[in-house]
Amino acid sequence: MFTDRGTKATSRSAISRRAALRSGGLALAGTALATGLPSLAEAAESADLTARTSYDSIVVGAGLAGLVAARELRAKGRRVLLLEARNRIGGRTWTDRFNDYEIERGGAWVDPLQPHVWREISRYRLNVVADAGPERVLMPTTTGFAESDPITAYTRQGELFTPFFDGAREYFPRPYAPFTREDLITPLDGFSLRDRLNQLAYAPEDEIRMTSTTGLYGAPTARGSLLQLAQWWALAGWNYTGFSGINTYRMERGTAALAGAILADGRPDLKLNSPVASVTEANGRVTVVTRAGLSYCAPEVVMAVPVNVWKRITFSPGLPQAHRTATQQGYGVPRQKKVWLDLATPTDRFLAEAPEDHPFVIMGRMNDNAPVVAFTVDPTLNLASHAAVEAAVRRIVPSATLRSYTVCDWQADEFSLGGPTYRSPGQLTALHRAIAQPLGRIKFCGDDLALGWTGYMDGAIESGLRVAGSPTLAPLPAAAPATHGIAVPRVDRRVYRSMIGL
Ligand SMILES: Cc1cc2nc3c(=O)[nH]c(=O)nc-3n(C[C@H](O)[C@H](O)[C@H](O)COP(=O)(O)OP(=O)(O)OC[C@H]3O[C@@H](n4cnc5c(N)ncnc54)[C@H](O)[C@@H]3O)c2cc1C
């Protein structure tokens, strides 16, 4: 049965009676008090209720993946209910304000190298702006920080990172089809970013410049998969210019403008503040029950929530082993927090990278008069303490003065339980295809499950398009053969060496 708010006590006959009254309700609303007929508000509510009692699809999660999935299903003529736990749409994108400045607490940057998000931006005619970028760069050395101009600093970074990804053109020849050379990626999938740094034995003064990047994404370097970063390298054109340029462009009116445009286009029935507690498939239908006890039923459900939160939802039948492993291990970067700082000094546009044992691994002011954006992966940094945050900034810029700051902890947020997606060693070949497979009438999507830009808005959109059966995308590859199991492949350094001739 289809139920809606208050329908724990509302029978079908009551619904039909209200619907019947509605037939003249709007015209009579002005006389409601005198006649005892429903008021305008009641009439609107009953219209709302009637419209919402029958759905072809339920989408859980109104991040970009869920919004796109809902729009695509609506475009096929489906009646779609979109259930969102938070009081806003957008998920891990969140345009907010800090000291009268518009900030992004989650995803921010987009790039023409990301075709799915770029197509959405064009579709809704959203303006894109480029950050002005830094005037000077601070890079770590073995004795402190050294300042240089951006071109010098990033030319050197390119020289250091290029060998890190040697072989990626062979093992990711088609970046959106990451399993094309499964024979090559399987033995490499056990490598962490730390394994690769160790293997290449960079000089200390060079390695120290690299763990800002590897620490930021791997959080920490030893946890992050080499192949995740290598796939981004491949997606960016197998070169450092593409790879490092990904974080340059933003939507002028923020990610909220994109999320809002997709919602307005698709017009699913949206219910905010509706965290889903259970999802049950039986007798050819799926029933979704919210924490408030309201239940909804449809022939299919699309779960557009992060893999990390699956463990907080009761599925019946239970999730398969691969799904359980993925949600227990986690797919979203743990520890990473994005912090916005209002610094009285310095006031110029600068970018600083720090080794991953620093409280902030990267921070910078990308535009004039803008706050400084910083990332930390240090679980010991006390973000509740102004003094601790200022001291952390001063580790890099000793003269800095902090006026105020704001932080978003996606790990602590029960509806994400992690930051952007970044896989651990072994997850690509052992889990990735298996967890994207539907469980009967329960389908899954989200940036976690993208074939391309996992961890980016582009991946979320790609995945939302695919789950809704968009004709522009190839279907999912089949799950990995059972023989792959879910164990992390053993790291055999000789494999990489012999493969790429090191
Ligand atoms: C700090 C940070 C920086 C980032 N920077 C960038 C960037 O610069 N560029 C870029 O492209 N990407 C970036 N990303 C990644 C990007 O934000 C994500 O890839 C993308 O937003 C994920 O979208 P999604 O729809 O897959 O998941 P989400 O956005 O997480 O959406 C899932 C939705 O499900 C809801 N939900 C969860 N549990 C339940 C439940 N039980 N019931 C109902 N609803 C539920 C959530 O509230 C959420 O709205 C960043 C992410 C973070 C956190």
Image (cartoon, helix red, strand yellow):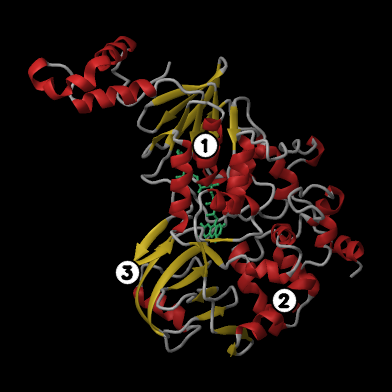
Q: Quadrant of residue 316?
A: top right
Q: Which residue is mark 2?
A: 158
**SS at circle 1:** helix
User: Could you tell me which quadrant the C terminus lies in?
Assistant: bottom right
Q: Amino acid at mark 2?
A: Gly
Q: Is residue 124 above or below residue 138?
A: above
Q: Position of residue 271 (x, y in %)?
A: 38, 35
| Mark 3 Cα-neighbour bin, 10 Å: few <14, some 14–19, many ≥20 | few
Task: Classify residue 320 as left or right of residue 47.
Answer: right
| Mark 2 Cα-neighbour bin, 10 Å: few <14, some 14–19, many ≥20 | some
At x 62%, y 49%, the residue is 116
Q: Is residue 87 above or below residue 232?
A: above
Q: Amino acid at mark 1?
A: Arg
Q: Which residue is mark 3?
A: 99
Q: Position of residue 193 (x, y in %)?
A: 71, 65
Viewer-side label of 1, 3: 1
Q: Position of residue 261 (x, y in %)?
A: 46, 46
Q: Amino acid at mark 3?
A: Asn
In this view of the protein, which residue sits in the foreground, 489 or 209?
Answer: 209
At x 77%, y 39%, the residue is 480
Q: CA distance from mark 2 to mark 1?
A: 40 Å
At x 74%, y 63%, the residue is 237
In this view of the protein, which residue sits in the foreground, 104 or 226?
Answer: 104
Q: Which residue is mark 1?
A: 71
